[in-house]
Image (cartoon, rainbow, N blue to C red):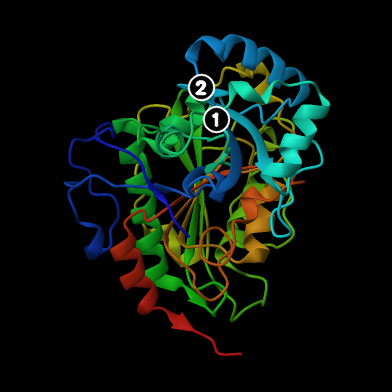
Amino acid sequence: MESLPCGEGMTGILEKKPRLLSDEDMQITVKNLVTPRAIVGKEFVDDVVLREAFIGVLRHKKDIAVALKVITSILPGCGHLKRCSGNRLFLALVKSPENPGKASDSSFASADELKTFLIAKNVNLNIFRDDFEIVKVPERSPRTRVQFTKASQAWPVNFHPDSSIEVIINGNFFDSKQLEVIESCMRVCIAAAKRTAIGNEHCNGSAVILDPDDEGISRILAVSTARVNEHPMWHAAMLVVDLVARIRGGGAWNLSSEVIPEEGGADRKRECPSNLPLVYPESLKSMTFPQFSHSVAPESKDKSPEDEKKCPYLCTNYWIFLLKEPCPLCAMALLHSRVSMIFYGDSNNSCGVLGSNALMHTLPGLNHRYKVWSSVLEAECKSAAECLSVIEH
């Protein structure tokens, strides 16, 4: 699937050159920028489809105002198209068996059929040249400025840019502090996977859950690796979500021996215990995890801080980092737990559903949508995934 570059610049961990983990491969100074790629719906990345339309060419420009008034009243047309381009007037779409158009569109199978219609409506066809032109026009309204530029080359269109989409498309969604936290968390993923991951074709990676704003700082809450040798559902994402549930006093599996203070219960999500992150398997405890000095949560104009503290779902507003693109099981678990953003390094050509084989997060009817970013330290994640233990079915 096509993806889009995003991000620039990085600073912001407590130490200028942090030694993130105890593994020798983690003794790396951050030098290069991570470049997360936004995985978005095809409607944002594909060129707008063109379809044929009838265009009337006016004999005299002085007739434009009258013609516009008359034609617009009897042929409402497509709202995303501008009616006039010079002395050329959009009249109607061409109807065809392959592309009949919407029921609300005014379309005609031939120029003669259109002329008959116009005559019946008392339109003076003498204001037009004898033959109508057939040109291709955009079938729908463009969603991005790039699409707008290309679509306008065929026929002028109305366009109202969505700033929230444009900032993702243009690669300006994350600031430098956010990018450094993203890279640090993905390095935790890589190191954890190399230590203990045992997976299969569906999941052979690791997962990290980050609270981007725990009372003004970012904090890693849980880290896990795939352990399908112990349980068929123990994919990395499934385990890390269960660890978050344990932080809140629940959890379906007894994954951690850590004692969770009572004040870290389900009703007080933001007051996390100090003995974090929780990990599975337990051998990951020997890792040294990065500490962050600031919040990296995006500014929200829709919710007040008080509203966000009352979120009823396990991972509301949290970010998750995955070595590999999630399978359907993990992608749906993350949807139901309401993570805010998913970052992964390596694609999952076998069964990935957030870029490789499907765009699950863009499907209609979902009651939650997370943002998805791929290619975070892609080469390093791919190299790590190729060396992991995999159980054959």
Quadrant in which residue 378 is drawn: bottom left
Please report the residue visible at 63 percent of the width from the left and 10 percent of the height from the top.
66
Is residue 326 shown left or right of residue 185? right
Please report the residue visible at 29 percent of the width from the left and 47 percent of the height from the top.
34
Answer whether residue 105 is visible to the viewer in this image.
no
Q: Residues within 10 Å of mark 2 (few under 14, many from 20)?
A: some
Amino acid residing under circle 1: Arg
For residue 145, above or below residue 45: above
For the residue pair 391 and 377, the one nearer the viewer reads as: 377
Q: Which mark is residue 59?
A: 2
Q: Position of residue 393 (x, y in %)?
A: 61, 90
Q: Position of residue 267 (x, y in %)?
A: 74, 31
For the residue pair 90 and 253, the one nearer the viewer reads as: 90
Please name the residue that numbered disc 1 is placed on. 129
Quadrant in which residue 272 is drawn: top right
The reply to whether callout 1 and callout 2 are in contact (CB within 8 Å) is: yes
For the residue pair 112 and 382, the one nearer the viewer reads as: 112
Q: Secondary structure at mark 2?
A: loop
Estimate the spatial distance between the alpha carbons at disc 1 and disc 2, rounded to whole Å: 6 Å
Dot 1 or dot 2: first in sequence order is: 2
Answer whether residue 118 is visible to the viewer in this image.
yes
For the residue pair 31 and 243, the one nearer the viewer reads as: 31
Q: Position of residue 389 (x, y in %)?
A: 44, 82
Q: Residues within 10 Å of mark 1 (few under 14, many from 20)?
A: few
Q: Position of residue 363 (x, y in %)?
A: 68, 51
For residue 281, above or below residue 369: below
Please report the residue visible at 53 percent of the width from the left and 70 percent of the height from the top.
226
Is residue 118 shown left or right of residue 352? right
For residue 353, above or below residue 108: below
Amino acid residing under circle 2: Arg
